[in-house]
């Protein structure tokens, strides 16, 4: 399973990337939405996207990704609670509050 990971915190990016890769996922990580957009690789099975990013925000990038690849599963991660509107912005998306329960995350992928 190919996973796109966008997380601006270097420690969180490294930790999520390492844990998911150790569980057998093919993970490509970026610190910004712009970096991810510049690398037009093959479609991903799932995208784990931080909501608050420098530059383009996670939900804006996710909507563009979903429009281009509607089968890509979208999972938002955030340290901020109170973002239920994201669940309706992209049908089937999920919002996880940090710290992330990796077992739950992998079940949702």
Image (cartoon, rainbow, N blue to C red):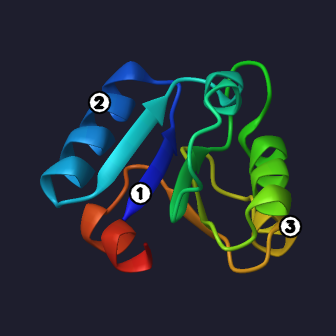
Q: x and y percent of residue 35 in the render?
A: 63, 22
Q: Which of marks 1 and 2 is nearer the N terminus?
A: 1
- For label 2, the SS is helix
- Disc on res. 89: 3
Question: Which percent across, then down, holds residue 10?
Answer: 39, 21
Image coords of residue 38 (percent x, y): 68, 24
Q: Distance between the residues labelled 1 and 2?
A: 17 Å
Q: Which of 91 and 45 is in front in this view?
A: 45
Q: What residue is rendered at 61% in x and 29% in y?
A: 39
The reply, left or right, for residue 44 in relation to residue 19 is: right
> Callout 2: 10 Å neighbours few (<14), some, many (20+)?
few
Secondary structure, mark 1, is strand
User: Would you place residue 69 above or below residue 99 in this image?
Assistant: below
Kindly give the residue lying farthest to the front in the view shown. Answer: 42
Cβ–Cβ under 8 Å for marks 3 and 2? no
Q: Earlier in the sequence, mark 3 or mark 2?
A: 2
Q: Residues within 10 Å of mark 1 (few under 14, many from 20)?
A: some
**Pointer 1 and pointer 2: residues touching (CB < 8 Å)?**
no
Q: Position of residue 25 (x, y in %)?
A: 27, 58
The residue that appears at 36% across and 65% down in the rendered structure is 1
What secondary structure is found at the residue carrying circle 3?
Answer: helix
Whole-number angstrom distance, CA of label 3 to CA of label 2: 28 Å
Residue, disc 1: 2
Is residue 75 shown left or right of residue 60? left
Give residue 14's mark: 2
**Sequence order check, earlier mark of 3 and 1:** 1
Q: Which residue is drawn at 86% across and 67% down?
A: 89
Q: Are marks 3 and 1 in contact (CB under 8 Å)?
A: no
As measured in the structure, the alpha-carbon distance from the residue carrying label 3 to the one carrying label 1 is 23 Å
């Amino acid at each position: 399973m190919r996973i796109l990971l966008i997380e601006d915190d270097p420690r969180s990016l490294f930790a999520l990337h390492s844990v998911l890769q150790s569980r057998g996922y093919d993970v490509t990580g970026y610190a910004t939405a712009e970096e991810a957009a510049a690398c037009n690789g093959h479609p991903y099975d799932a995208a784990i996207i931080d909501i608050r990013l420098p530059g383009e925000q996670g939900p804006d990038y996710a909507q563009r990704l979903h429009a281009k690849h509607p089968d890509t599963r979208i999972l938002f991660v955030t340290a901020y609670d109170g973002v239920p509107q994201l669940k309706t912005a992209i049908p089937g998306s999920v919002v996880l509050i940090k710290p992330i329960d990796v077992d739950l995350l992998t079940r949702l992928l």
